[in-house]
Amino acid sequence: MNDVWSWERAADALPQLLSAFFEVTLLATVLGSAIAAVLGLVVAVVRRSAPALIARPVHWVMEFIRMTPVVIQLLFVYYAFTDWEPLWIGIGVLGIHYSTYMAEVYRSGIDNVPKGQWEAATALSLPRQRTWTRVVIPQALRTTVPALGTWVISMFKDTPFLFVITVPELVSAAENYGSRTFTYVEAFTLAGLIFLAASYPTSILVRKLEARLARY
């Protein structure tokens, strides 16, 4: 066992991996999720309410983004805009990529708003903008939060892809530590456990939230 695993090396690696997790991986997840959530909602509303001349091109762009690997998107932007900071490229690409999935979640939530709510807003002569902001979107968000949480977890688990554009996230930190000390097993085991420790409780929280919302 000692030939495979060193507790001393593991203890030495852990602070470096936690630093990469909090300073890069978690930051990329939080900011990327914020971009995805806001942009996804905008896309969903545009596709639901805008004229076909606008809605169709938006749909085509979203389909293209969703159907191409996020790694290719990262590398394309990284090499196309060499002056940009790799971390911000990663955050932006992850946010835009996952906005396409969140847009579908929002669209489903909007479609599930009872028709009577739309009719009531019309009967009250609410302007279209207020109908969306006061009636439709709040009800749609209530049913979409659990699904959005699932996509946030997926984005979190995709942050290692930022490794390909030199972003020093958690997996990159594990690789660098392993290459310096030749203790890859300890480094990648700890990295995996950190991902598990963050994603598993979050997934349980999402499931509990989904079950609670289903009762109302």
Image (tube, grey):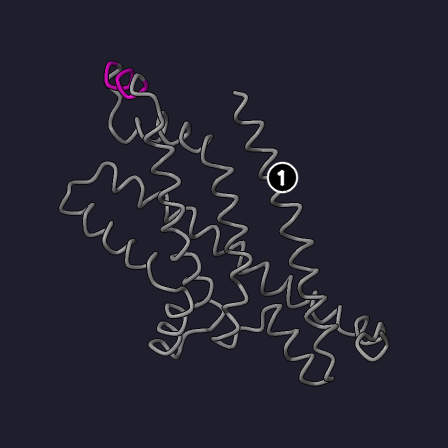
Q: Secondary structure at mark 1?
A: helix
Is residue 66 depicted above or below 116 in this figure?
below
User: In the image shown, does 201 or 129 lie closer to the viewer?
Assistant: 201
Question: Which residue occupies 55% across, 21% down?
Answer: 215
In the picture provided, is 6 more to the left or to the right than 84? right
Q: Depth check: give the residue in front, 37 or 170.
A: 170
Q: Residues within 10 Å of mark 1 (few under 14, many from 20)?
A: some
Asked whether 79 falls inside the magenta stretch, the response is: no
- Compared to residue 124, the image places residue 153 above or below, namely below
Quarter of the image where one finds residue 8: bottom right
Q: How many marks?
A: 1
Q: Residue at x 57, y 59 (%)?
A: 27
Q: Read off the residue under disc 1.
A: 205
Quadrant location of the N terminus?
Answer: bottom right
Q: Position of residue 121 (x, y in %)?
A: 28, 19
Q: Answer above or below: position of 124 versus 149.
A: above
Q: Amino acid at mark 1?
A: Leu
* Residue 115 x/y as whole percent: 29, 20
In the displayed structure, 26 sits above or below 5; it is: above
What secondary structure predominates along the stretch shown in magenta? helix
- On the image, the x and y values in percent for residue 70 come to 41, 64
Which residue does the image show at 51% across and 50% down from the upper left?
Answer: 152
Residue occupying the far left of the picture: 53
The residue positioned 29% from the left and 15% from the top of the image is 120
Query: In the image, residue 185 lies at what x, y percent?
Result: 72, 74
Q: Look at the image and give the residue range highlighted in magenta.
A: 117-123
